[in-house]
């Protein structure tokens, strides 16, 4: 983070008209953004553009600052190209994020991911989320409602249709014209995801961010595999892609999808866009592939598009892979 903040870690931007796309009402030079959780407090807000990201999602921010879980809480699983984290929404709180956003001078769009404090009960969560949305929506290009982190006990229960409906109504109202997205869990069943899609449509939500980390552990080789927390990276890829396809089938063109989870290569990105994502995000691939991750992924995507004779992302979006 120090190297990123100080501008030491940089990468040359990839600009190619074939990669242009639009999401959350913004024209983007390409579809790859930074996923939530890397820059929770906006410490490096003005540096992400120099690493080639087309947009960045800050947060998860909570109303009051909180420490998160005790360390160690982040584990590398290099043999699996994965991470396990149980950070628990460590963040400097809404006041501080507001202050950082007011100093914003980045050229790229900024989303803000919001959550509830660990000690706010689910019954009272609506007020936490609505207050976060009310105070940041003017400075954000979109708001992401996080109801899918596995590291705040009970949080994922807010994905149930009744709680989610009430919550989204309040957040959409508080956000006024700023588009609202909901971030979902890969561990939800297909039926639950259908319900989430229906609620999103009826509450005028702009789209869905799919997906957060998983609590499932399948076929991992690293020693740290038994650590508690959310698993991200390569082992998440196939479920995240499947969720993306499902959501696109359920929502047709009524919702946008930001695809995230296990995107490491241009092929992964190609498949996610073909599965219906309007834009994508990376986190774990940035950790393992380093400062040039975005540029490498985009060059690989262009190579694959060339090979398939695809000239732009609209054409790519019309491809559906079994
Ligand atoms: C250390 C760490 C912290 C994270 N913190 C958050 C968070 O605060 N809010 C959130 O919505 N997602 C958070 N995520 C999830 C990522 O945004 C992303 O959804 C997930 O890692 C899957 O993408 P990936 O496979 O590219 O890493 C976190 C992930 C990691 C590895």
Image (cartoon, helix red, strand yellow):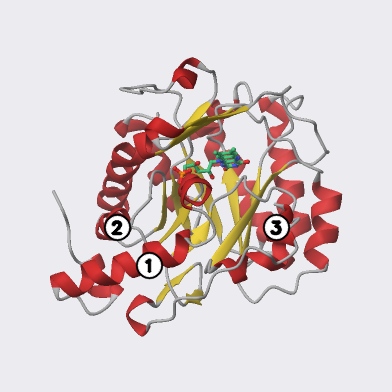
Quadrant of the rendered image containing residue 297 = bottom left
In the rendered image, residue 74, in percent from the top left (x then y), is placed at 61, 30
Q: Nearer the viewer, mark 1 or mark 3?
A: 3
Query: Secondary structure under badge 3?
Result: helix
Q: Secondary structure at mark 1?
A: helix
Q: Is residue 69 left or right of residue 38?
A: right
| CA separation in Å, label 2 and label 3 | 35 Å
From the viewer's perspective, is residue 113 above or below residue 276? above
In the picture of the structure, the residue carrying the numbered disc 1 is 298
Secondary structure under tag 2 reads loop
Dot 1 or dot 2, earlier in sequence: 2
Q: How many marks?
A: 3
Q: Nearer the viewer, residue 314 or 225?
A: 225
- Residue positioned most to the top: 226
Q: Which residue is mark 2?
A: 276
Q: CA distance from mark 1 to mark 2?
A: 18 Å
């Amino acid at each position: 983070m120090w190297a990123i903040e100080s501008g030491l870690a940089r990468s040359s931007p990839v600009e190619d008209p074939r990669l242009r796309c639009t999401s959350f009402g913004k024209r983007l030079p390409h579809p790859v953004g930074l996923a939530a959780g890397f820059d929770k407090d906006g410490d490096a807000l003005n540096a992400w553009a120099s690493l080639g990201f087309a947009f960045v999602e800050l947060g998860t921010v909570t109303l009051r600052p909180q420490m998160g879980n005790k360390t160690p809480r982040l584990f590398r699983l290099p043999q699996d190209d994965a991470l396990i984290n149980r950070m628990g929404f460590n963040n400097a709180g809404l006041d501080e994020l507001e202050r950082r956003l007011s100093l914003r001078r980045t050229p790229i769009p900024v989303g803000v991911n919001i959550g509830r404090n660990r000690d706010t009960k689910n019954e009272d969560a609506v007020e936490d989320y609505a207050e976060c949305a009310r105070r940041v929506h003017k400075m954000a290009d979109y708001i992401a409602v996080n109801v899918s982190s596995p590291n705040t006990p009970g949080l994922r229960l807010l994905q149930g249709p009744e709680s989610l409906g009430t919550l989204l109504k309040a957040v959409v109202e508080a956000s006024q014209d700023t588009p609202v997205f909901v971030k979902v869990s890969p561990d939800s069943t297909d039926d639950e995801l259908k319900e989430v899609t229906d609620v999103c449509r009826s509450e005028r939500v702009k789209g869905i961010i799919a997906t957060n980390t998983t609590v499932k552990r399948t076929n991992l080789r690293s020693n740290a595999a038994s650590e508690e927390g959310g698993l991200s990276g390569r082992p998440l890829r196939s479920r995240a892609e499947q969720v993306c396809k499902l959501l696109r089938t359920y929502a047709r063109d009524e919702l946008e999808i930001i695809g995230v989870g296990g995107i490491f290569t241009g092929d992964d990105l190609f498949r996610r866009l073909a599965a219906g994502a309007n834009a994508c995000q990376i986190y774990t691939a940035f950790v393992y592939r380093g400062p040039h991750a975005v540029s490498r992924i985009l060059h690989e995507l262009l190579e694959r598009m060339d090979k398939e004779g695809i000239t732009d992302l609209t054409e790519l979006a019309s491809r559906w892979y079994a």
